[in-house]
Image (cartoon, rainbow, N blue to C red):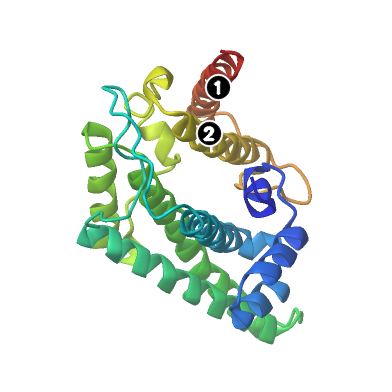
Amino acid sequence: MNELQSWLDNPDRDYAEGVALFAQYSKNKALVRYFQTGTARFRMGKLVYEIGKVAKTVSDERANKWANSQPSAPYQAPSTPNAPTHFKGQTKNMVIPDFILAAKKEVAALYALIDKRHRELYDLGTSNADDVVRHRKRILDERKPAIQRADRLYRLKEEWFALDDGTAREQVSNDIREMLAAPLEEQPTICAPVETRHATSLQTNVSGLTDLQLSKRRTQLRSSITKTQNMLQYQSIRKAASPTPMPKGPKRDEYEQKLKALKAEFKAVTEELARRSAN
């Protein structure tokens, strides 16, 4: 596992360390400067997304380098009934639906809009004059739905790639289409993260997953557990300067139920990986 993947797998990611790693591996100098001039509060989500892409590129390059160093007559593994023919989330030779491409395009556009609002806030300065305060509030009010929509649409898109064809993926597909059809100011109200709303259908049958799929799911669960705990303690997917616990009510109950389910699944995945390692 390379240092990029190690950073991604760490639930307590350090923003400065992530920016330094991205600068080391990425050739996009403009994007590097974008992260260097920002903060974890506003740009951590996009940094995780971009480092994930870089990590995959590095992994593919290493795999190609290894493949090119092998003899010209490739080894043919014996066929076994239980041998997996593909990995969940694999995109090579996969026909990506139009709504997924549209979701990816909209997430990129939302990030651009959020960055524009950040620059407007920076240019506005720190004055507390009445007109500046009103302008600042307007910018914040316009930015909030864009941040929420980008986060939810990105998580739905990633969940679609992580699922096999079936009821769960179809439900996520419908959610994505519904979000894309709604204007930004009228987006569907989904208070809880996607995993809670599909808690029943998204439970992982750990015994039926490959080692690679289990490892990926464990990483996803670590991230989801951290974000859910932060929502309960800070009402944000990232830690804030001081705790602002979510008040008692249906929303908190839903997040607590989600956290319990995520921890149970994480335990099952971890135990299954340990069992396989011992054999």
| Identity, as a three-letter code, of the amino acid under mark 2 | Ser
Position above or below: 171 against 19: above
**Residue at the image position 36 percent from the left and 21 percent from the top:** 208
The residue beneath circle 1 is 273
- Give the quadrant of the N terminus: top right
Graded by Cα atoms within 10 Å as few (under 14), some (14 to 19) or many (20 or more), the crowding at tag 2 reads some
To which quarter of the image does residue 11 belong? top right
What separation in Å lies between label 2 and label 1 (alpha carbons)?
A: 8 Å
From the viewer's perspective, is residue 69 above or below residue 259? Answer: below
Q: Horizontal and vertical percent for residue 49?
A: 53, 59
Residue at (55, 22) in percent of width and height: 273
- Lateral position of residue 58 relative to residue 201, left or right: right
**Residue that appears at 36% across and 64% down:** 104
Image coords of residue 40 (percent x, y)? 69, 61
Judged from the image, the secondary structure of the residue bearing numbered disc 2 is helix
The answer to whether marks 2 and 1 mark residues whose Cβ atoms lie closer than 8 Å is yes
The residue carrying mark 2 is 215
Q: How many marks?
A: 2
Task: Identify residue type, mark 1.
Answer: Leu
Residue 138 x %, y %: 54, 75
